[in-house]
Each structure stands twice: as structure tokens, then as C-alpha cells.
Amino acid sequence: MKKIQVKASKNYPVIIDSNLLNDSGNFIKETVSPLPAKVAVFCDDKVEPLYADKVEKSLKSSGFETFRFIFKNGEAQKHMGTITQMIEFLAQNDFTRKDLAVALGGGVTGDMTGFSAAIFKRGIRFVQIPTTLLAMVDSSVGGKTGCNLSSGKNLAGAFYQPELVICDTNCLETLSEKDFACGIAEAVKTAVIQDAELFEFFRKRITNKDSETLKQIIGKCVEIKANVVAQDEKEGGLRQILNFGHTLGHAIEKLSNYEITHGEAVSIGMAAITKAFVKLNKVNPALYDELISVLETNNLPVKHSYTKYELFTAALSDKKRNADSITVVYSPELGRAELLPMKLNDFENLISAAF
Ligand SMILES: NC(=O)c1ccc[n+]([C@@H]2O[C@H](COP(=O)([O-])OP(=O)(O)OC[C@H]3O[C@@H](n4cnc5c(N)ncnc54)[C@H](O)[C@@H]3O)[C@@H](O)[C@H]2O)c1
């Protein structure tokens, strides 16, 4: 079992291995102190029939009283209406600040459960049990929680760290090819911005059967994210590099009404921003070709059908935008990222260069 310690405003372990769900109750008992009495498991309706019984059985045998809240799967549910239902559920079941929420699922479940935990009674503790590759390599670690507003992606939220993250790689066996590829997109992002060696893994197609390789990939991505978060938890500077591909990605997700998933949009966003920087002579065309090849090899999209105007307008609702400027992330060479603040009219020209 690999264990990585995240050192932020709260220190917590991320454990990575196969067959961890059956012991999730024990891991929680060993880590969460003082012990909660009640545990609420939050999951969507696709994950629930697959893994909720297993987790609840383990929690019960560790002595916890368990509760289960199920919501419809998908990004379209990631809004304040679902958050309200989640925190009402905690209130109706008389949860106190000593009790615990568990996010069992992908990034949507993790982000919303974390946000609910952050605001219910001004904060109850929560544990992440990610079941998608995307959530294991990225969203379950680092404490960004939240939901979408009609104006844009993740516009409501809180920085709120979990007590523990349990990555059971067996969960990846039931992921669809498309959802699996979305996790690869975030892992490729991590490689491009921080680790050229990690990038090598993706030159051949990774599948959800490659369990030993996946453990290594997840371990590397979590180490990198933990290191960035330890230096800049609240995204004042360095942490913004993790948004490589995301400014345009979020815009594409929103424009598609979330038909294009987060991972797919990040893939298209990385391709588009890299193409734009090649045109500005800040990135070598060879890097762009390598990126496209790796993304396509791993079944990820690299093109979209939106206009410059649509993309620019949608990108303006990005959280990272200031009144008249926006910070753009690009990679001048594999394994390294730069932050470039730019005026909005320069950003508009940059988007034009991506076409
Ligand atoms: N907090 C962060 O730092 C951070 C970072 C990156 C992305 N995100 C967020 O994460 C979300 C995307 O995450 P995601 O791709 O995991 O989406 P998701 O949670 O919607 O999961 C994708 C699909 O996979 C299904 N699923 C989950 N686990 C499964 C399993 N083991 N087997 C079969 N099906 C399973 C889900 O029901 C869903 O239909 C976005 O909302 C994005 O904004 C957050």
C-alpha cells in the first residue's frame, strides 16, 4: 500500500492500493480522531449499486452508524439544489459537528460532499473515497470543493481539506472507457506541467486493466499535487499551474451544457492553449505534436466546434479572471509550466491564435 501525506492547513494521508474498500471502516477508525458516531455516505446512482453496500458494511463493522444519500449521476447535478438536499439530509438525521461525511464517487461527488461538509454547521469532517481515475489523480486531493452556478463552473465553493483519501484501484475496473480516459487527461496535465518522466507512461494507451501501472500513475500524480498544495493551498500563485488547459476547458464544458465532460474538455483545452502558444513562438511545435499524439492515443478529443467569440465570452466567467486581466498557464517544455497574466484583449487575441 502506498501512503502519501498531504501537508496543508490540515495534514492527512492518501492511501493507494487495490482492495481497500472492504477495510474503509478500519482506515477511518484509525485516522479520524476523535471518532465520529454517525457517518453519511454520499454517492450517485451509478456508484451506489456498485460500491455503497461494501463501504457501509465495513463502516458498520467498525462500529459506525451509517446513513446513505443518493443523487442522480453527472455534472448537471453539481449545483446548489443538490447541495441543499445534502445538507438538509445531514440536518434531518441530526448530524453534529463530531460526525463524518464520506464522498464515495467521482469528482462531482467529491466536490459536492466536501462543500456540504464545509458549510454544514460551519464545518464537519469528511473523507474522500474516489472511484474514478480523475478523482484519484486529482480532485480528491487538495481541498477544492464546490459546485457550478448557472453563470459558470465551480463558481461556489470552499477550500476544505478531507481527513483521509482512500484510493481503491479496483474501482477503476467498472469505469466506462470514456470516464477512464477523462482521468488520463488530468494525469497527462500533471505530467506536462511537472513531470516529463510521467509523460512517458502515456505514449502508449493505458487501459483500466493496467492496474500496476495505474497505481504508479496515481501515486506520482498525488505526490505532485500534494507538493504543489503544500506550497500554495489557496491558489495565490503556484497552484494555478494545475489549471493548465482548464480556462478554455471550463468554457467548453459550459458551452456544451456539460455534454462534453470535464476530462474531455481539459484535453481539448490543453490542445487549444498549446496551439495558441506555438503560434506566439513561446512553445516548440514538437511539444504540441507530442501532446496531441498522447491525447489521441489515449482516446481523448483535441478539437471543438465553438467560435472564437463563444470561447472568449464563456472563458470570461473563469474564477481566475480579475477585472481586466486573466492568468493563462502554458508549458514551454515538458515537465514545466509558466503562468502568464494578460490583459483581456491580449487573451482574446490568444484565443484567436488557437484556431
Ligand atoms: N476539486 C478539484 O480539485 C477538482 C479537480 C479536477 C476536477 N474536478 C471536478 O471533478 C468533476 C469530474 O470528475 P469525474 O470525471 O470523476 O466525474 P463524475 O463524478 O461525474 O464521474 C463520472 C461518471 O463515472 C461514474 N462513476 C464513478 N465511479 C465509477 C466507477 N467506479 N465505475 C463506474 N462508473 C463510475 C459516475 O457515476 C459518473 O457517471 C468535475 O466536476 C470537475 O470540475 C475537481
Image (spheres, grey):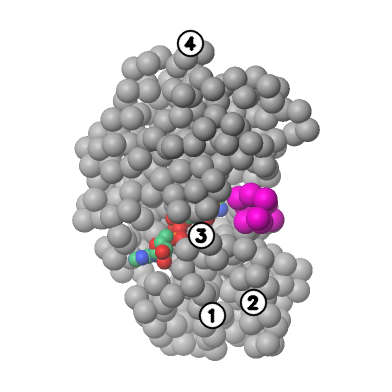
In whole angstroms, how far apart are the C-alphas of marks 3 and 4? 36 Å
Check whether the beta carbons of the residues at disc 3 and disc 4 lie within 8 A of each other: no
Q: Position of residue 225 (x, y in %)?
A: 51, 44
Q: Is residue 336 visible?
A: no
Q: CA distance from mark 1 to mark 2?
A: 9 Å
Q: Name the residue that disc number 1 marks.
A: 69
Q: Secondary structure at mark 3?
A: helix
- Give the Cα separation between the discs numbered 2 and 3: 16 Å
Estimate the spatial distance between the alpha carbons at disc 1 and disc 4, rounded to whole Å. 51 Å
Q: Counting other residues with Cα less than 10 Å from the Cα at mark 3, is it few (<14), some (14-19), or many (20 or more)?
A: many
Q: Would you name the residue on which mark 4 appears?
A: 281
Find out whether the residues at labels 1 and 2 contact each other: C-beta distance under 8 Å: yes
Q: Nearer the viewer, residue 27 or 81?
A: 81
**Amino acid type of the residue that numbered disc 1 sits on in the rendered structure:** Phe
The secondary structure that most of the magenta stretch takes on is: strand
Label 3 beta carbon within 8 A of ligand 1 = yes
Q: Earlier in the sequence, mark 3 or mark 4?
A: 3
- According to the picture, the residue beneath numbered tag 3 turns out to be 75
Q: Quadrant of the N terminus?
A: bottom left
24 shown above or below 288: below
Tell me which amino acid carries mark 4: Asn
- Residue 52 location, quadrant: bottom left
Name the residue carrying label 2. 85
Q: Position of residue 191 (x, y in %)?
A: 40, 35
- Which quadrant does ligand 1 occupy? bottom left
As drawn, the residue found furthest toward the top would be 281
